[in-house]
Image: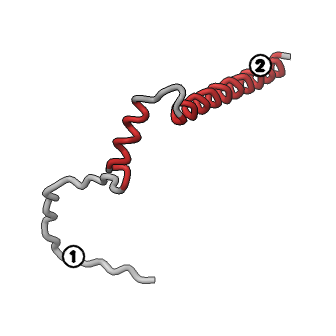
Amino acid sequence: MELVLTSKKLGRLTKQKQDYVNEPSGFLNSQYKNVVERSYKRKNKSSIFGIRQRIKSKSYATSCVAETTLKLSLFLVVMVMIFN
């Protein structure tokens, strides 16, 4: 394996005229996105969207309670084992 070094002078790098911004493109920037946002803001309890959101929030709350209970019980068991 061989290392080759060169002493070539490099020119100055030009600054980029515009910042590169990665913007998402596709159907989420279209009318569909506006419809979804309006539906989310105007959700009705009896609509399918409102029912789905309620179910999701209840399942999330239930899983958070179960997770917290398991972590707390594990912590207490470890503390009891350490101090006994």
Residue 26 lies left or right of residue 9; in this view the side is: right
**Residues packed near mark 1 inside 10 Å, few (<14), some (14 to 19) or many (20 plus):** few
What percent of the width, then of the height, locates residue 82?
80, 21
Tell me the quarter of the picture where residue 56 sits. Answer: top right
Q: Amino acid at mark 1?
A: Ser
Query: Mark 1 against mark 2, which lies toward the viewer?
Result: 2
Instruction: List the residue tagged with mark 2.
Output: 76
Q: Amino acid at mark 2?
A: Leu
Residue 7: which disc?
A: 1
Q: Earlier in the sequence, mark 1 or mark 2?
A: 1
Give the residue furthest to the bottom: 1
Element on which disc 2 rests: helix
Query: CA separation, marks 1 and 2?
Result: 66 Å
- Establish if 33 lies above or below 9: above
Tell me the quarter of the picture where residue 41 sits. Answer: top left
Going 52% across and 32% down the picture, which residue do you hit? 47
Residue 52: which disc?
A: none
Element on which disc 1 rests: loop
Q: Which residue is more in the foreground, 19 or 5?
A: 19
Q: Which residue is more in the foreground, 47 or 28?
A: 47
- Establish if 36 lies above or below 43: below
Going 54% across and 32% down the picture, which residue do you hit? 53
Give the residue furthest to the right: 84
What percent of the width, then of the height, locates residue 31?
33, 48
**Residues packed near mark 2 inside 10 Å, few (<14), some (14 to 19) or many (20 plus):** few
- Establish if 64 lies above or below 37: above
What percent of the width, then of the height, locates residue 75?
74, 23
